[in-house]
Image (cartoon, helix red, strand yellow):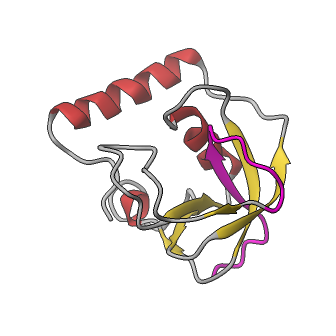
Amino acid sequence: MTDAKIYYHGTKAALKVGDLVEPGHASNYGKRKQAAFVYLSATLDAAIWGAELAVGAGPGRIYIVEPSGSIEDDPNLTDKRFPGNPTKSYRSREPFRIIGEVTEWKGHSPERLEEMHDHLENLKQRGVEAIEE
């Protein structure tokens, strides 16, 4: 575990307090393989990216979550893009429980979102999987 006291999960799934977010569902990224991990962050900005980039219809949502087991640095970000984990991004094989929702948050600009979508499309065209499990 880390010293953070508040963790967030960004998604487009409509969930409610008490629901569990568990591994085993189709991933929101890449080839949508069955996810072996669930992802969370101790920063609101990382959760905003999760909410904005998740597949599916409907608005992005950001939930406040409580891990039920151990968490580890998310190697998809920390080892490859942001050494030292400044995004405070984590993953777990254990579910986490929704304990609240952040209802007021500001997303990234349309230009910044387009840049990120273009970057992800470029990775896809090169055959690079966004999430490695």
Answer with the quarter of the image where residue 124 lies: top left
> Magenta segment, which residues?
1-18
Q: Measured from the top left, where is residue 61 in percent x and y?
A: 70, 39
Q: Measured from the top left, where is residue 80 in percent x and y?
A: 32, 58
* Rendered view: 1 above or below 52: below
Horizontal side, residue 9 vs residue 37: left or right: right
Q: Count up the numbered dots.
A: 0
Farthest residue, direction left: 126
**In front of the other: 95 or 89:** 95
Q: Is residue 36 magenta?
A: no
Residue lying at 50% horizontally and 75% vertically, measured from the top left: 93
Q: Which is the main secondary structure of the residues drawn in magenta?
A: loop
Horizontal side, residue 84 vs residue 100: left or right: left
Q: Measured from the top left, where is residue 89 in percent x and y?
A: 55, 61
Residue lying at 81% horizontally and 62% vertically, measured from the top left: 18
Q: Quadrant of the N terminus?
A: bottom right
Q: Measured from the top left, where is residue 47 in percent x and y?
A: 63, 47
Q: Quadrant of the C terminus?
A: bottom left
Horizontal side, residue 133 vs residue 26: left or right: left
Residue lying at 37% horizontally and 57% vertically, measured from the top left: 34
